Amino acid sequence: MSDEISYDFSEIIRLRKEVYAFDVNLVAALVLGSCASFFSRFIASFFGFLAFLIFQRKIAKAAHSPCPRCSEPFGVKSDFALWVGSSTCQNCGLHMYNANQ
């Protein structure tokens, strides 16, 4: 009998999939920015920046989801996350696809 512990990564996987899923708010900001570019560069850049913030917030939410083992951020610790992180916890080394370590 082994002392293997099974960890649930369903929330981390769901959040990582949501980053690249269709988002109405993001598409609306991009479309409005494209339409606004005919009238004002300032307004178009505002909508471009808004689309960036929406996407950045989704990445940060997925990157800062807690590790099931150590409860620290699984993907990235920095406040400004540029990506969701790797499949290994940056703190305790728990691997998402080989969780029985």
Image (tube, rainbow, N blue to C red):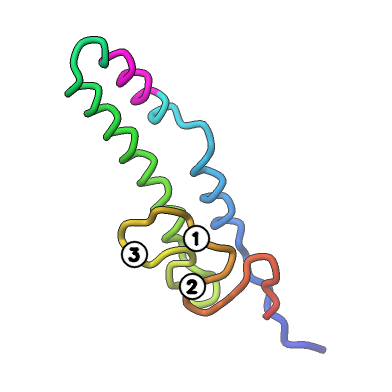
Amino acid carrying label 3: it is Ser
Residue at the disc numbered 3: 78
Residue 86, position as x, y percentages in the image: 54, 63
SS for callout 1: loop
Determine the main secondary structure of the stretch shown in magenta: helix
Q: Is residue 74 magenta?
A: no
Q: Earlier in the sequence, mark 1 or mark 3?
A: 3
* Rendered-image quadrant of the N terminus: bottom right
Residue at the disc numbered 2: 90
Rendered residue at 48%/66% (across/down):
74
Residue at the disc numbered 1: 85
Rendered residue at 67%/72% (across/down):
99
Amino acid carrying label 2: it is Gln
Residue 69, position as x, y percentages in the image: 54, 76
Q: Is residue 95 left or right of residue 30?
A: right
* Rendered-image quadrant of the C terminus: bottom right
What range of the chain is rendered magenta? 28-36
